[in-house]
Amino acid sequence: MVTRGDARREQILYAAMVVFADHGYHRASLAGIAEHVGISQAGLLHHFPTKPRLLTAVLEARDRLDREWLAELDPDGRTGPRLLVNLLRLVDRNRRLGGLVQIYTALAGESVTDDHPARAWFTDRYGRVTASVEAGLLAGADALRPDVDCALLAREVVAVMDGLQLQWLLRPDEVDMVAAFRDYATRLIRSTALDPEPLVALLASAVPVPLPAHAG
């Protein structure tokens, strides 16, 4: 059951995403975030005692939403080359939730400085995400050619997704990141999967898919 406190925490997290995106982490104020929610700064601090704690919660919430959405969408499609189909669906979701993607990318860029409170989180996250993609590929390795290096492939896939996302944010009228990732995934499946054509056909029809109800 969702409690009143849980609902308030979610409101604060979404407000923080907006304010961090508009102003950056360092220039964003807790007072401004509290004003977005319609509560006092003291009320915000009751849920998130420090600004770094709030930032970490925002980043974790974004990742949690992605995991929950993918698990609900296709619980059996997270292993082997089929994983690329779900990653294409995630790229499409990000395209339609551009504000969240912009927030995340802006914070990721800020975090490369040594003193940024999210640096450790992003460093750990890239390790977790790459390891998760590698584990998914290995779990379905029987559908891959035996010479495929799943660790190297996982790092490549994450790099392509992030690179396309940044190019799309900078030039949304010129870069179709969904089409570009579909083309990339199609080439990758054809070069790594033992039976690529069924997955290539699935890639061609995998998007768009419904967004979560709360995304509007």
Image (cartoon, rainbow, N blue to C red):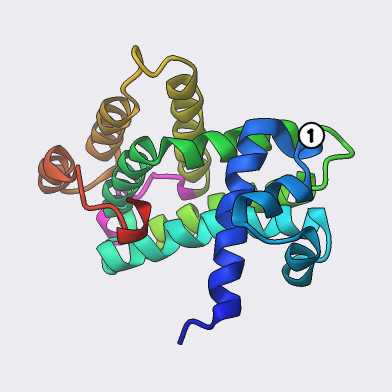
Q: Position of residue 162 (x, y in %)?
A: 50, 33
Q: Nearer the viewer, residue 19 or 111?
A: 19
- Residue 119 visible somewhere in the drawing: yes
Q: Is residue 146 magenta?
A: yes
Q: Residue at x 43, y 14 (%)?
A: 171
Q: Nearer the viewer, residue 144 or 166?
A: 166
Reply above or below: 137 against 25: below
Which residue is identified by label 1? 27
**Is 100 displayed left or right of 191 in the figure?**
right
Q: Magenta part mainly helix, strand or loop?
A: loop
Reply above or below: 12 against 187: below
Q: Residue at x 16, y 47 (%)?
A: 199
The quadrant the N terminus occupies is: bottom left
Q: Residue furthest right?
A: 115
What SS does tag 1 mark? helix
**Is 212 displayed left or right of 198 in the figure?**
right
Instruction: Name which residue type carries label 1.
Output: Arg
For the magenta stretch, what is the residue range?
142-150
Assess disc 1: are there few (<14), some (14-19) or many (≥20) residues with their C-alpha within 10 Å of its C-alpha: few
Where is residue 50, by image quadrant? bottom right
Q: Position of residue 9 (x, y in %)?
A: 61, 68
How many tags in the picture? 1
